[in-house]
Image (spheres, rainbow, N blue to C red):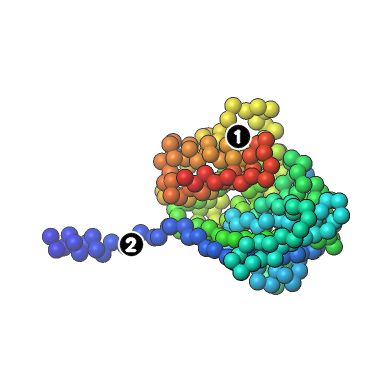
């Protein structure tokens, strides 16, 4: 009896794979466009810079900042002050245009921040990115919080469309050597594929919308997931794409793949027919 208890007590403890939420003080920063690069036919990378980035923090690979666009008519940029209780206080005038974007890469020494813009629907952020030039001013707010996902799962599943490529790229870059990742990434076609660097062992599946037809029966990412053999072992799944597609992928992972719901983070980065939406499907 005692030997059995000793054996059980001596078993190695399972790793703590509980994701952690970290809050940050809200701050808005006025920055300057330093460089603009057309990475693919549908992806523009804008590098922002300025001393206001001195204490910028973005520890979570899928963090979001609020991009504050200048007035489309006057070109004037307005950013709020923050009250003592953390509330943004906007000056009188037209309401600022805000959009959510993932910080692609931050260089603390150079004080530069890269933001990738997926060019599809012609919203105000897309229009701004298509005409962005060095010297122009734009603002960012946040991130207000970060979601830190441990890296010591048996493997990692990353599913997303081109709006999620910055988060996917950041996650792959932070995975250590010896980690394993399966990535399903949806873009228009081969010309929109980008390099994704990682020390991990990565299986990358590109899903092309052009090949899916005008009106596929189900989201292309879900079809690709059904057709992909998943590795064995405990895994964390991260999903970022159109809202209905993200919800369908999450349901498939739980119902058909026996995924642990606590180890799934699914977000609708955009919603068909709506503007400026960001949905969470974690519950």
Q: Which residue is nearer to you in this view: 94 or 205? A: 94
Question: Which disc number belongs to residue 13?
Answer: 2
Whole-percent x and y of residue 70?
A: 80, 56
Q: Label 1: state its secondary structure.
A: helix
Q: Residues within 10 Å of mark 1 (few under 14, many from 20)?
A: many
Residue 214 in which image quadrant: top right
Q: Is residue 208 visible?
A: no
Q: Residue at x 47, y 40 (%)?
A: 253
Horizontal side of residue 2 vs 19, given as left or right: left
Q: Residue at x 67, y 53 (%)?
A: 101
Horizontal side of residue 33 vs 222, given as left or right: right
Q: How many dots with numbers? A: 2
Question: Which disc number belongs to residue 220?
Answer: 1
Q: Label 2: state its secondary structure.
A: loop
Q: CA distance from mark 2 to mark 1?
A: 39 Å
Among the two numbered marks 2 and 1 on one chain, the one whose residue lies closer to the N terminus:
2
Q: Which residue is nearer to you in this view: 48 or 22? A: 22
């Amino acid at each position: 009896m005692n030997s059995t208890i000793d054996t059980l007590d001596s078993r190695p403890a399972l790793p703590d794979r509980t994701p952690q939420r970290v809050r940050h003080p809200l701050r808005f920063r006025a920055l300057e466009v330093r460089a603009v690069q057309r990475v693919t036919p549908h992806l523009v990378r804008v590098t922002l810079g300025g001393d206001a980035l001195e204490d910028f923090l973005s520890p979570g690979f899928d963090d979001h900042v609020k991009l504050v666009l200048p007035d489309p008519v006057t070109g004037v940029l307005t950013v709020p002050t923050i009250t003592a209780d953390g509330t943004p206080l906007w000056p009188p005038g037209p309401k600022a245009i805000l959009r959510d974007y993932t910080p692609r890469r931050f260089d603390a020494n150079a004080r530069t921040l890269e933001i990738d813009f997926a060019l599809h629907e012609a919203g105000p952020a897309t229009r701004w990115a298509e005409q962005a030039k060095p010297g122009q001013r734009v603002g960012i707010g946040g991130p207000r919080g970060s979601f830190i996902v441990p890296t010591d799962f048996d493997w990692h599943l990353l599913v997303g469309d081109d709006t999620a490529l910055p988060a996917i790229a950041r996650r792959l870059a932070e995975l250590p050597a010896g980690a394993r990742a399966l990535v399903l990434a949806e873009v228009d076609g081969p010309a929109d594929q980008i390099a994704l660097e990682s020390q991990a062992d990565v299986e990358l599946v590109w899903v092309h919308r052009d090949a899916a037809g005008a009106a596929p029966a189900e989201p292309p990412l879900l079809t690709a997931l059904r057709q992909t053999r998943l590795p064995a072992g405990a895994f964390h799944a991260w999903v970022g794409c159109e809202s209905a597609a993200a919800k369908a992928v999450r349901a498939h992972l739980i119902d058909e793949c026996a995924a642990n719901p606590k180890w799934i983070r699914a977000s609708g980065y955009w919603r068909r027919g709506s503007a400026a939406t960001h949905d969470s499907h974690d519950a």
